[in-house]
Amino acid sequence: METTAKLEHIVQIFRALSDQNRVRIAALLAGPGEMCVNHLVDNMGMAQPALSYHLKILSDAGLITRRKAGSRSYYRISSTFLRNLVLGYCNLGDESHCQGCTCSAPEQR
């Protein structure tokens, strides 16, 4: 990957993570395994079309992947860096920012 393309990709990643909703989605997906889009809708408290918009931005940046199984879609973090960043932040001790994420409620997966 050429230097300009690398820089553009880094900018795309930072843009994807510049929205609080997308960071919350990353926190929900930070645990092991994957999460069904229906569970993401429930945990995020937003309409499915709005969630899909945010998921697409994260996916286009290469931060998450989607697996289709019939009519359902399952998402997972594809970036070890992002998983470590989110889990590291959530492990700082103040979990109030992570409403519904894996650091405060792993049983919701």
Image (spheres, rainbow, N blue to C red):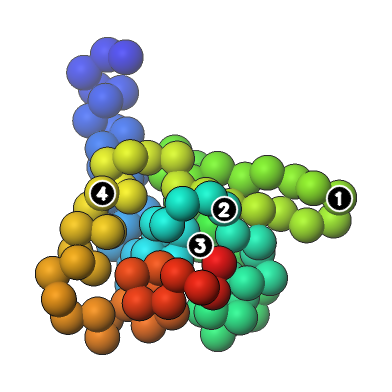
- The residue lying at 68 percent from left, 44 percent from top is 67
Q: N-terminal of the two: label 1 or label 4?
A: 1
Earlier-in-chain disc, 3 versus 4: 3
Q: Quickly name the residue at label 1.
A: 70
Work out which residue is located at the far top of the displayed protein and give it: 2
Determine whether 54 is above or below 49 in the image. above
Looking at the image, residue 51 sits to the left or right of residue 31; the answer is right
Position of residue 60 relative to residue 88, above or below, is above
Marks 1 and 2, how far apart at CA: 16 Å
Mark 2 lies on residue: 34
Picture disc at residue 92: none
- Any part of residue 7 in sight: yes
Dots 1, 2 in contact, CB < 8 A: no
The one nearer the camera, 16 or 106, is 106
Residue at the front extreme of this rendering: 107
Kind of residue indicated by mark 3: His
Q: Nearer the viewer, residue 12 or 29?
A: 29
Taking the image as drawn, is residue 21 in sight? no
Give neighbour class at mark 3: few <14, some 14-19, many 20+ (Cα, 10 Å): some
* Residue 54, label in figure: 3
Q: Name the image quarter holding residue 35.
A: bottom right
